[in-house]
Amino acid sequence: MTHPIHVQRLSRRRFCATAAAIGASAAWLSPAVQAKPVNDEFQLNYMLPSSMYGYAKLAEILPEAKKIGATQIDVWPKVHGDQREQIDALGEEKFAELLKRNDVQLGCITQYKLGPFGLQDEMRLAQRFGCQLMVTGGAGPKGLKGAELKKAVADFVEKMKPQLEVAEETGVTIAIENHANNLIESPDSLRWLLELRPSKHLAIAFAPYHLPQEEKLLTQLIHELAEGMQMFYAWQHGDGAHDPLPTERQLLQMPGRGPLDFQPLVAALAAIRYQGWTEVFMHPVPRGVPILPTVSETTAEIARGRNYLDQFVAQLAKGK
């Protein structure tokens, strides 16, 4: 299996979604607005992935967003988490009230379960909450290279067109993660996806974990993919995310713990004035458990990863 890493994302945009029920249809009105830092300096725009907390309740997770400097949450379904299923159990109105109570917006829905060709209804739900991003994988043949890979990516893009029509209608961007054992997993597949995409509503979720752990290559790719990146997972391979390792070895996936130096990656994000989201990320073993035993410990570890990244941002601001 290729090395998995989740990408991190920088943005000056903040989407402010206010959900309100409209009559018996329970539709939601959620205007999105943009906000820029007062000093217009580069910064990472953090989003909190619900899967880091396993199957913890949304009511427990949402208050943690502000503690890691996030205003948005990325909701995951089973098996990594079950917060997407919790939305269905709560109902949209109660979920909207929960978001409002915690001053958090639904920023992303990660949906590998539905796949890239089954997102229509999910995008309409996202629209009702002012959510403008969805992450999934790139379905298709695996292990291709050269002309065969380019043709397969072109075929994938063609099959995505009905999804992209709904994406444009709902204001949602579908970001494809370079996930192992998928069509879109290699540097070349990412390059072809960006070159062949027919709409900016098809984008890239950049996961260093799934790529060779070479700072030079990852930095080059950030520059090459700048126009299309919408999610950056701050996630390195470490000792992997598939074997039942001791917790301290699993945590080597986190930024600042494993051997990957994120300084050049952050510098590249700053150089391209990255406008996407960043998630401090890892996968625990087994899936569905939190990365650490308690909600507070999990949040503290995410905050540690954020601080590790932000030190590089601060250095850049000082001209170092």
Image (cartoon, grey):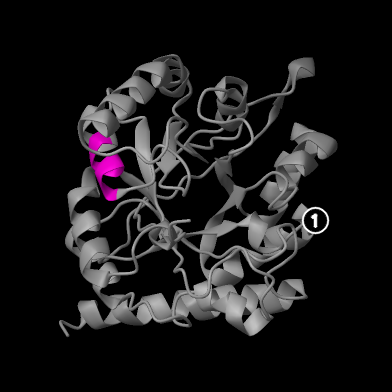
Residue 92 forms part of the magenta stretch: no
Residue 271 % position (x, y): 17, 63
Question: Could you tell whether 81 is left or right of 75 in the image?
Answer: right
| Part of the protein shown in magenta | 187-192
Residue 176 % position (x, y): 42, 39
Residue 315 % position (x, y): 25, 83
Reply above or below: 220 against 254: above
Element type at mark 1: loop
Q: Which residue is mark 1?
A: 57
- Count neighbours of disc 1 (C-alpha within 10 A) and say few if under 14, some if 14 to 19, many if 20 or more: some
Would you identify the image quadrant in which residue 284 lies?
Answer: bottom right
Q: Amino acid at mark 1?
A: Lys
Question: Could you tell whether 146 is left or right of 200 in the image?
Answer: left
Reply above or below: 308 against 244: below
Question: Could you tell whether 135 is left or right of 191 in the image?
Answer: right
Reply above or below: 213 against 73: below
